[in-house]
């Protein structure tokens, strides 16, 4: 009696051809974006919690307003936002491809992930670059110190 080995039925079987592919690019992106995200997140935390006088107790609307008024921190936060959303969306895409076997449901799930990522990136970028740290109706004691000069 000979035993036969059955191969599992994957939604996307392994390809035999070599060269660039979307899956390979996604795999490389996850590793690279993960490394960059670690640097961005720990830089963000170190600045906010260690290098800022007062630590966590100094974080209020004025602190955030002052930080987001600086183009360096705007770009830092937008880069962190974009990479985090794209990294997470790519991970969700991988999970859907691995576990959703019905093509129509997979297509709907992947479309929903793409739409959600696009909306979050758009809104997050818009908020970061249009944030007004000196709203005219705010309590002056809560505003950053540079608002008094305006």
Image: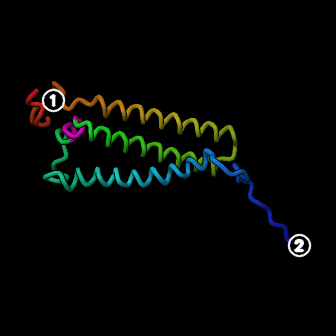
Is 106 left, or right, of 27 in this rendering?
right
Residue at the limit of the structure toward the top, as seen here: 136
Name the residue that disc number 2 marks: 2
Is 128 left, or right, of 49 in this rendering?
right
Q: Which of 104 and 131 is in front in this view?
A: 131
Q: Where is residue 125 in the image (x, y as percent from the top left)?
A: 36, 33
Could you tell me how far apart the alpha carbons at marks 1 and 2 are, in whole angstroms?
80 Å
Q: Are marks 1 and 2 in contact (CB under 8 Å)?
A: no
Rendered residue at 69%/43% (across/down): 102
Q: Nearer the viewer, residue 28 or 41?
A: 28
Q: Where is residue 143 in the image (x, y as percent from the top left)?
A: 14, 35
Q: In this view, does 32 lie above or below 139?
A: below
> Which corner quadrant holds the N terminus?
bottom right
Tell me the element at label 1. loop
Tell me the element at label 2. loop
Q: Position of residue 105 (x, y in %)?
A: 65, 39
Q: Is residue 16 magenta?
A: no
Residue at the limit of the structure toward the bottom, as seen here: 1
The answer to which of marks 1 and 2 sits earlier in the sequence is 2
> Which corner quadrant holds the C terminus?
top left
Q: Which of the labelled discs sits on residue 98, or is there none?
A: none
Q: Nearer the viewer, residue 61 or 80?
A: 80
Rendered residue at 55%/48% (across/down): 26
Name the residue that disc number 1 marks: 138
Is 93 left, or right, of 55 in this rendering?
right
Magenta stretch, residue numbers: 64-69
Q: Where is residue 46 in the image (x, y as percent from the top left)?
A: 25, 55
Query: Colour scheme in the image?
Result: rainbow
Instruction: Name the quadrant containing residue 82.
Output: top left
């Amino acid at each position: 009696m000979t035993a036969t080995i059955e191969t599992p039925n994957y939604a996307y079987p392994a390809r035999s051809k070599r060269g660039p592919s979307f899956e390979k690019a996604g795999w490389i992106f996850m590793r690279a974006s993960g490394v960059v995200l670690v640097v961005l997140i720990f830089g963000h935390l170190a600045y906010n919690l260690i290098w800022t006088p007062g630590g966590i107790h100094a974080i209020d609307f004025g602190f955030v307003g002052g930080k987001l008024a600086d183009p360096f921190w705007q770009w830092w936060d937008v880069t962190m936002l974009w990479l985090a959303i794209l990294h997470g969306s790519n991970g969700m895409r991988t999970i859907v491809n691995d576990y959703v076997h019905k093509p129509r449901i997979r297509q709907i799930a992947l479309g929903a992930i793409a739409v959600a990522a696009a909306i979050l990136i758009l809104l997050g970028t818009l908020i970061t670059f249009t944030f007004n740290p000196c709203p005219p109706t705010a309590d002056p004691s809560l505003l950053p110190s540079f608002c008094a000069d305006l």
